[in-house]
Image: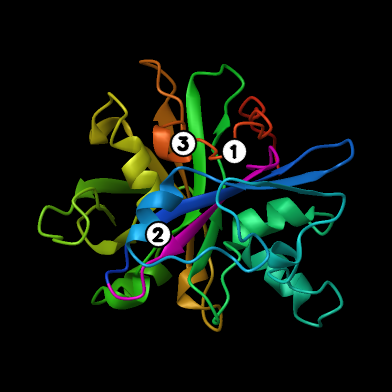
Amino acid sequence: MAGDGVVFVAWQHPERRGIYPVGRLLERSEAPRFEFTYIAGVREAAAAGFSPFLAFPELNAVYRSDQLFPLFQNRLMPANRPDYPEYLKRLDLPADVGPVTLLLRSGGGRATDRVELFGRPTLDRSRTVFSYEFFVRAVRHIPYAEETARSLQPGERLRCTSDWQNPSDLNAILLRTEPPALIGFLPQYIAEDLESHASTRQSLEVHVVRVNPEPAPPQHRVFCRLNAPARDGFVPFASPRYQPTASDAWALPPIADAVAT
């Protein structure tokens, strides 16, 4: 389970649907516990129409606090809600999950904005495999994908295939079963990041972890884990667009080793 205290913040264009990484939240054990800073991708997003968050108006500033910033706290489901235990079950998380891990797994989505949260992968014990965890995208928009999803079993492998006919995202990766039946897409931020990986698509392994039937929302229908070789000098989410705009921002901690959940 990803949980190294690093949360990337992405903004989705309201019309073109493109995903732009714009900021990052870091959590550490000592005070001040939390830091938010914009990252270089915010420049591209601003050119496409993104406006700075009201709580973080300066693109080159560092914001620090001992408490989780309201922008993120307000994206957590209250633990006293009657459906909270079912919510954690749907996200494949334990009852004692921390707020940052909960944000990462849920994506922190709200109906009032176009913000998405995501984290870095973990490394396996041998430190040779990166593991990304994610919910399959666009299940409700692909014909018969909902029906196909109902038949998926935990541990079942999904195949990655390029969506060459997608004019809005040249890096798009479709996920399908074997025999072929489309399920949905890999999250755009993962597909874009893996584009710089020297490995071929065939070396990526995606396995189903959990399928949530209705009434779970479609965006939480199929939860998966993707394994990619940790080789060729590849470092996830380390391209220039993920670098902080502030020169005095905290350094990222090492990518965490995977732990059983």
* Residue plotted at (66% across, 35% down): 249
Q: Work out whether mark 2 precedes mark 3 in sequence or the reverse, and give the earlier one.
A: 2
Q: Is residue 107 above or below residue 241?
A: below
Callout 1: 10 Å neighbours few (<14), some, many (20+)? some
Residue 237 is labelled as: 3
Which residue is labeled 1 in the image? 246
Residue 117: which quarter of the image? bottom right
The answer to whether residue 45 is left or right of residue 56 is left
- Under mark 2, the amino acid is Ala
Percent of width and height locating residue 104: 62, 54
Question: Residue 189: percent from the left, percent from the top?
Answer: 40, 49
Task: Please name the amino acid that badge 3 sits on.
Answer: Phe
Question: Residue 232 or 167: which is nearer the viewer?
Answer: 167
Viewer-nearest residue: 24 or 138: 24
The part of the chain drawn in magenta is: 1-15
State whether residue 25 appears in this view: yes
Instruction: Give percent across and percent down for residue 212.
Output: 54, 70
**Crowd band around label 3 with a 10 angstrom C-alpha radius: few (<14), some (14–19), many (20+):** some
Tell me if mark 2 has few (under 14), some (14-19) or many (20+) residues whose alpha carbon lies within 10 angstroms of its own: few
